[in-house]
Image (tube, coloured by chain):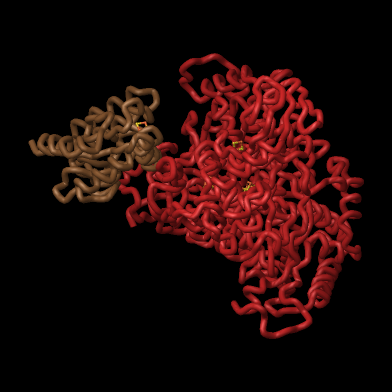
Amino acid sequence: MAMLLSEKQITQLKRRVKETPHPREMILDVLHAIQDANGWISEEGVELAAIILGLSPLQVEEVATFYDKLYRRPVGRKVIHICDSICCWSRGSETLMLRLQQLLGIAPGETTADGMFTLLPTCCLGACAEAPAVRIGKTLYGNVAPEQLEAILDSERAEGQL
Amino acid sequence: MPTLIIDNLTVTVPEGTNILEAARQLGIEIPHFCHHEALGSVGACRLCAVEILAGPVKGIQMSCMVPAKDDMVVDTCSAEVLAYRAQVIEWLMINHPHDCPVCDEGGECQLQDMTVAGGHGIRRYSGPKRTHQNQNLGPFISHEMNRCIQCYRCVRTYQDYCGGTDFGVLGARQRLYFGRFNDGPLESPFAGNLVDVCPTGVFTDKTYRFKSRLWDLQEAPSICPHCSLGCAVIPGARYRELQRRRARTNKRTNGHFICDRGRFGYGYVNHPDRPRHPLVGHRRVTWQEGLAALQNKLQELGELFGAGSIGLLSSSRATLETQFLTKRWATSLGSDQVCFEAHPVRDQGARVAASQPLDRSASLEDVRNCDLAVLIGADPLSEAPMLALALRQAARRGARIVVADPRPVVLPMACERHAVSTDKLARLLRGLSRPQQSALPASLEELGGSLSQALLSARSPVLIGGTDLLGPQGILALLEAAEACSQPEHPCRTMLLLGGPNSFGGALLSADGPGFDSLLEGMEQGRIKALLCFEADPLADFPDRKRIRAALSRLDLLAVFDCAATATVQEADLFFPTTAVEESTGTLINNEGRMQTFEQVLSAGTPIAESAGGSHPPRFFTRDIPGTDPQPAWGTLGALMGRCADLGALRREIEKADARFAGLSLLDANGEGRRIAIPRSRPVALQPAVANAVAPDQLSLLVTETLFGSELLSSLSPCLQEAIPAPFVMLHPQDAMRLKLEEGKKVTLATPLGDLTLILRIQQDMVPGVAIVPRLRGTALESLVPGSEPLPCRIEKA
Ligand code: SF4
Ligand code: SF4
Ligand code: FES
Ligand code: FES
């Protein structure tokens, strides 16, 4: 379990938890630390977070399963979140979703064979003004047209392979 | 006090009342899911919509979220509102499986009712439904997540009200999931309440699975017999089998919930080993033969040795009616050797407790509303589980909760703890009578003094104590401390935990009569030749098992009237079966002095499940119903005195004979009960406790009640068996280290009563120098009874 984070990280996080009046405030920080180190948060990851935070695993899991940018299953190196909420849908996100599936050869929820991309629909990226929006890794793309997708994927892939 | 108009009717309600509750006062039930009287409103289900025609907010609003205001005009069933609700219901039903025929909730399902009320009859949605994997949540609760309508009542009950941390809400939106991190038994001792609060069939009673529909059940208002709090319950029976218990609402006592001991302890009624026939020796006889044998023997003994040779013992399980007639019968036999508790410490403790001024005795409602609770020698989860839940509600409102105890008292919330050994609790109590300011109390007296100061300045303080640890002297000191910490405007109330559901009644009736120890001496000296036990089990309940066994074997006659296969029943010369609580009517007086009656749920009889040997309907038809011999103990006592069984007349007689029971005959089983009218007088002489000598290299052995497995009747319930722990002993880490013992390993506990092999649990929050074992009936620990002076003991590796 300790393999999920270094001893030093664990000590540091525990110290920060101790300093906060409400340890629950730190749930996201601890989960992000585990996700950053491992790409996703496993069952053991939730249990480790619970120990660091002094909470029950359930209390951590409640938060971990609430946010769709916290991954409770293994994902590719870059996760593509494509918005399917109202603004983006009204501006053509369905076409984008179909095009992405074609380009990547995977269905929503799947990961490409090379382990590079995982495709996930998401409910609003907070970029409604730039609908339709797609987020790849940590980069947000607004006003995306279907024709742009191939180039975007290529550059993301190239960057991911570095 | 705003006055408003709802559906053309005017109503005035207290400030802060929401429209949903205001409508209820007019008898108008607005359809709803997420609002619950005990849990409050969250506005999550959107079903309780009403139209506000005039007032600070207008239009369609959630009635549970809008406080009633002066001059509001509300329409609960305008066309627009009805259409709104119909849509909400249709939307809630989108994912709901149409599995009512195989759902245990069917017939008592709020979703069924609301769907019908909302007028949603035809499904328009034809897409796929959301589905979930269910979890195994342990022996008590079944899980069927597909039926969920996301009202959040379960989480609010489990986490907020009950303080559980292992169950909650996972996911978001369409993926919402109410469950645990992974499969496993729910940890909260109040988990069973999920069954009552979930408005659909997600959480159902596993012990009752696929047994009956509500409309087939026989139900009646009853009282839980498994501790001294007397929570309100509704047991349900069918086919001569008690099939479940659910919570009933009594705002003065349990509120809306009950504990799992109360909910799942019902199985003793159906126990296959329950003796159901009168026995002479071990031979089955008719009632007439049995009673004749009893009368003859008593007459013979009376003639030979005088009436004083007959001892009568009842118990805290017996109803007030039974206790009263036990005493009456003793009088008519001419014997004064009658008592109501086989455990002398509990007896004396209850007698002191029953002398507390009634306006000072705290109900569970008072505890929920207190701003400071000090617990001395009281372990709520073990001795009176619902008290723990009441304390949590106080803590949620900001009350300070202080626990002083040798045991690692666990509460469903954070509290202030002081590990104090049993012998030092008296010093603490002494300090409690002398208020003093001290920021950092250095001694127990000073701690007591500072707590006393806090009690004096609190608005609604409660001092809580348990008879097992404090004993009669301690209880007396606690009552005196409460007096010293009282201000005229805000008195310090007391709540004392007693041995059983009617300890209080026994304490009132026993006056200054003998305790069981004096009956025992009579038996040992040969003065007492006959012992008649009415729902009493002296063999298990008297703390010194060897002594009681020897005394019982000297008797010429041991007659036992009981509803369970107790240790004493095995030794009886004559046995008479009595009804269980659910099989008769009667009155119990809880630990605060509240008289509460219960009604008959079912008639005694061998469950069809048992008599038909698993095949139903029975293949053979006979005129008589098997197993119907049990009679209420008060009925049998009446018959022995040549009376007819008329409960109403008996209650009027009790009232007339004893002013303390005024109002008994008027009690309504559905009501809140009624405090007794006058407390008893303080017992005259209290025997001082004699401490056992403990050598420096020894530990002292403290026996304590535990949640599951200590109380007699619930410990016989088959559905509780999985929750009863394997025998264990608890040690402070310091002692464990000194003795080189490890957590979870087998150890040998050497006591004057013999050696026992137990599992070690290391507990940080207890006092050092003590070994603590739970009372667990039917296990190696059986002969160890709480409420006695700690014995010396040793522990080593097994
Ligand atoms: S499980 Fe029951 S109580 Fe919990 S949210 Fe679903 S319907 Fe409501
Ligand atoms: S607290 Fe006591 S009376 Fe109440 S339900 Fe539990 S065991 Fe029964
Ligand atoms: S709706 Fe797509 S980003 Fe908000
Ligand atoms: S009861 Fe008001 S919104 Fe659910």
Q: On screen, B264 above or below B43?
A: below
Picture residue at 55% right of the left edge, 34% below the top: B392
From the viewer's perspective, tell me whether residue B296 is left or right of residue A162. Answer: right
Give coordinates of residue A109: x percent, y percent. Answer: 29, 48
Picture residue at 91% right of the left edge, 51% below the top: B653
Q: Quadrant of residue A62?
A: top left
Give coordinates of residue A44: x percent, y percent. Answer: 27, 45
Quadrant in which the N terminus of chain B is drawn: top right
Q: Nearer the viewer, residue B353 or B184?
A: B184
Identify the hue of chain A: brown
From the viewer's perspective, tell me whether residue B244 is left or right of residue B72. Answer: left
Identify the residue at the far bottom of this view.
B620
Q: On screen, A15 above or below B123?
A: above
How many numbered dots are placed on residues in this image? 0
From the viewer's perspective, tell me whether residue B613 is left or right of residue A60. Answer: right
Give coordinates of residue B606: x percent, y percent. Answer: 68, 72
Q: On screen, B541 above or below A61?
A: below
Q: Nearer the viewer, residue B761 or B314?
A: B761
Identify the hue of chain B: red
Please say whether residue B759 is visible from this viewpoint: yes
